[in-house]
Image (cartoon, grey):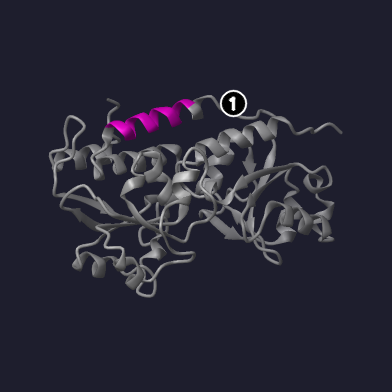
Amino acid sequence: MRPLPLSLAVLALSVGHAFGQTDYPLTIDNCGFAVTLPAAPQRVVTIKSTATEMLLALGLGERIVGVGFQDGPASEPWAATAAALPVLSDKLPSQEVVLEAEPDLVYGGWESNFSADGAGERPTLAALGVAGYVSPAACRSIKPAKLTFDDIFAEIDEMGMIFDVAPAADALIAEQQAALAAIAPDTRGLSALWYSSGTKTPYVGAGSGAPQMMLEALGLENIMAAVDDGWVSASWEAVVDANPDVIVLVDAVWNSAEQKKQLLAENPITSQLDAVIHQRYLVVPFPASEAGIRNVGATADMAAQLAGLSFSP
């Protein structure tokens, strides 16, 4: 079995984790909050697509008793299973709605999901016997380091330990590592803008989150790499000054890639960008743009798109 990352290995030893099995009760540090699990969770509410698809990829779909705030359709091979899951809310479900599902764990893709006017604050949920786990890349109370694919694999490891499915986690990590290793970075020295959302003010991928991680794997230089954050509100003037060779368009239900293309073409400023004139776009689904198990596949898909772009004069 592949060894755990150091932080997880120390934790595993402290709880008697050995031979691929988890000893309970299990206590882990998650975004600076101590999460204690008396046993492997059997009833889970997932909030955000990243949390839902993580469990589906580990074969834990039958333990999901409700989902909320999903960012779009799940990818294959989990689409059918995800479509059949009980939807608690199209947006962030309230604590009352969450508790009606009788979960023993709430798995959130954003730390802000656990608020008094949202799914409930984690101490409050814990007092009711419901654990709350945040995807580590989404920590905000403790700022995470610059995201790497190893961090994604570490979350898979941690899920394997929490649910006592280490063999499934190891297999998933090995599969993703192989797929990542097969991606050849572009060597043309190209620059890129990661355009997530926004019209008057573009919300773009900055230098420390999932967009930067994927752009680096593609061999692209992020024009906003100097900003130490996952995403940032930029200006169209700054984008025009940088004149990126490629623009990554995040395709969301509420702001599609086609809508972004139209905006860029109709805006007098951005219409003069080389990437807009020559339609040098890469498209990524919104659920794959946040830290999670879809990042590797999305990077491979964008690598294929990038290879098909022409940069002839």
Up the image or down, 183 lies above or below 46; here it is above
Up the image or down, 298 lies above or below 64; here it is above
Determine the image quadrant of residue 45: bottom left
Up the image or down, 19 lies above or below 164; here it is above
Residue 81 at least partly seen? yes
Residue 295 belongs to magenta span: no
Which percent across, then down, holds residue 196? 62, 55
Which percent across, then down, holds residue 293? 45, 41
Callout 1 crowding tier (Cα within 10 Å): few <14, some 14–19, many ≥20: few
Classify residue 209 as left or right of residue 162: right
Which percent across, then down, holds residue 85? 42, 53
Which percent across, then down, holds residue 183? 56, 27
Q: In the rendered image, which residue does mark 1 sit on?
A: 184
Up the image or down, 182 lies above or below 281; here it is above
Residue positioned most to the right: 313
In the picture, which quadrant includes the N terminus?
top left
Residue 169 belongs to magenta span: yes
Magenta highlight: main SS = helix
Determine the image quadrant of residue 267: bottom right
Residue appearing at x 39%, y 27% in the figure? 174
In the picture, which quadrant includes the C terminus?
top right
Closest to the observer, 238 or 138: 138
Classify residue 287 as left or right of residue 204: left
Which type of secondary structure does the marked residue at label 1 adopt?
A: loop
Span colored in magenta: 167-178
Residue 189 at least partly seen? no
Closest to the observer, 6 or 226: 6
Closest to the observer, 208 or 43: 43
